[in-house]
Image (tube, rainbow, N blue to C red):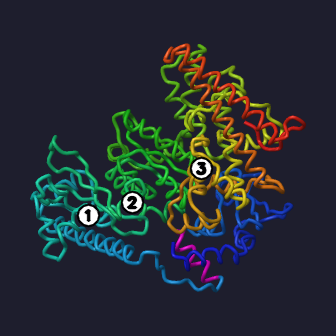
Amino acid sequence: MNREFGDVVRRIKESADIVGIVGNVVQLKKAGNSYKGRCPFHNEKTPSFNVIPAKGIFHCFGCGAGGSVIDFVMRTEKLDFREAIEMLAKELGIELPQFRPVDPQQVDADQRLIDAVQRANNDALAWFRQNLRKGRNPLANNYLPERGISAEMEEKFQLGASLDEWTALKDHLLNLGYSEQLLVEAGLCARSENGRVYDRFRNRLIFPIFNANGKVAGFGGRQLVKDDKSAKYINSEETVLYKKSQILYALNWAREDIEKSGHAILCEGYMDVLMAHAHGFTQAVASLGTALTLPQAKLLKRFANKTFFLYDGDTAGQKAMLRGGESLLEAGFDTRVIALPPTDDPDTFLQREGAPALQQLLQNAEEFFDYALGAHAKGLDLSKLAPQAELADRMAPIINRISNEVMREGAIARLLRRIGGLPRSALGRILQQAANTANRTEPESRPAESAADRAVSSLFEGISLLDVYVLKMMLESHAALEYIRSQLRHEWIIDKKLEGWIFYFSDHDGYAQTLIDEAELENEFPGDRALLSRVMAWDHPIGDNPVRAAEQILWRLRERYQLVLTNDLLELISQKQIGSEDAQRLLTAYHLEHRSRIAQSRRLFGLDNQQASQPSE
């Protein structure tokens, strides 16, 4: 990280009046050491949005939004990290240095490659456009009216055409001074096993793919002549500019209307988006033929809180919606599903039925959770116990992905009504088991929880509380962080949602906040940023002796890990995968070591005389 730039980030966080900045958007009321108000990122009647000036953070316990003053400005002003830094630095009168990374030569080379690929993309787009305008590929010119694409839509989406030749684009770009190697790195050309470089896109209608800021990042191509040896649609390969899982097709054109309307319409492909825009649904974007990813969902969250799925009506489209919907739930979206007839895609439906019919489907769109519930319940006889259990198991991972607590509670209630008769406590255990399976299974037996523990369990439902507490101490105390770094073993951490942050802090030197700043500067987070904010906002002191508290919690982690090993051994024995003599010897050793560790742990926690204050699991 550029030290000067990192210093500016810290100065901004220290100097900015987070209460004042948030107060310009949210009506805040003081509540103890924090301020409360209604969240600006989702609709709520009871305030669950908190600003904690002592920590310089905000957090909404309803939708999960949270972070520093920089995060707040990014979300409310629809800026990326660097743009938010520049805006705040200007307002605070802080001089922003030129970005000079630690290794200037390497970064200069990286930036030169990025600039060169961008120029090559721009020149390739101009060539593709000229081919279409001048009719150099008659198949492409004939294809547009056949599919109902007007001249206005062609111009808006900057469509083009490639030629039915192996090296036409390569030859053109070589004449402009580009090297073959650069064209391969840009994804415009490919290299065969014998070293021959040829055009990636041949005899195709070309759809340029722009990033959210309107710069061409890559291309998609549609066959003009059926060829079973090649895919109907192909996209650019991953390059320094094109990251498929992080780009939404047409977001550069749709973002303004998405923000105005408060919702986005998600399609699967290029033609679906074009037809949606042509019929007035200018909030349409596409996930480029794959199920929506979490990075794509988070990108979209900068502009809207509500989404509509408009995927193909066939089985493949339904499955893609089920996969992508989970990412939207995790990002905190209100997600609806527009169910098209099984033989239709958005293109064919709009061409045949027109905009009013789709508008009606939009108004009657089903909530994603209800859609998923219906899809997973299909074929199950819910009057029987086994199918009821099967449905609960199928829906548990989906419920666990819902980040909004209100939506999560509503989903649980709907599932219980659909099943009928299943106690809420039983469903709670199923949800926990599903979370444990996703995070690496942990033992079910645990000490009784106190009322305070149950409240924390609700706040971090589906997440290992021991791991939460470890991360809390790493964030709150540098002394505890140093002790944990010296003692923690990776295998003791079981929660996949938290392990990225925990290992990031344990494996890198420095204060936790400094490491967070570095992650922000690189825009590469080792875990869920919102979850980190929730842990930081959790009002739970770690005590006057943080090293002692860290020592105690690490003993609990070690004890839990020992239980896992013991259970694994018992499983091997039950499956007759280990001989009886070896089993007896190993069990005796495990038992003695485990009893010794429990005794030491009880002494550390003072459990012989009193109840420990840390969360139990």
Disc 3 from disc 2: Cα separation: 22 Å
Residue 290 lies within the magenta run:
no
Which of pointers 3 and 2 lies earlier in the amino acid sequence?
2
- Contact flag, marks 3 and 1 (Cβ < 8 Å): no
- Per the rendered image, the range of residues in magenta is 79-91
Q: Residue at x 62, y 46 (%)?
A: 403
Identity, as a three-letter code, of the amino acid under mark 1? Glu
Q: Residue at x 41, y 43 (%)?
A: 311
Disc 3 from disc 1: Cα separation: 36 Å
Q: Image quadrant of residue 205?
A: bottom left
Residue 426 in picture, x, y percent from top left: 69, 25
Residue 185, labelled with which disc?
Answer: 1
Q: Image quadrant of residue 77?
A: bottom right
Residue 444 in picture, x, y percent from top left: 67, 28
Mark 3, residue position = 332
Helix, strand or loop at mark 3: loop
* In the displayed structure image, the side of residue 227 where residue 89 appears, left or right: right
Q: Is residue 67 above or below residue 606?
A: below
Q: Nearer the viewer, mark 3 or mark 2?
A: 3
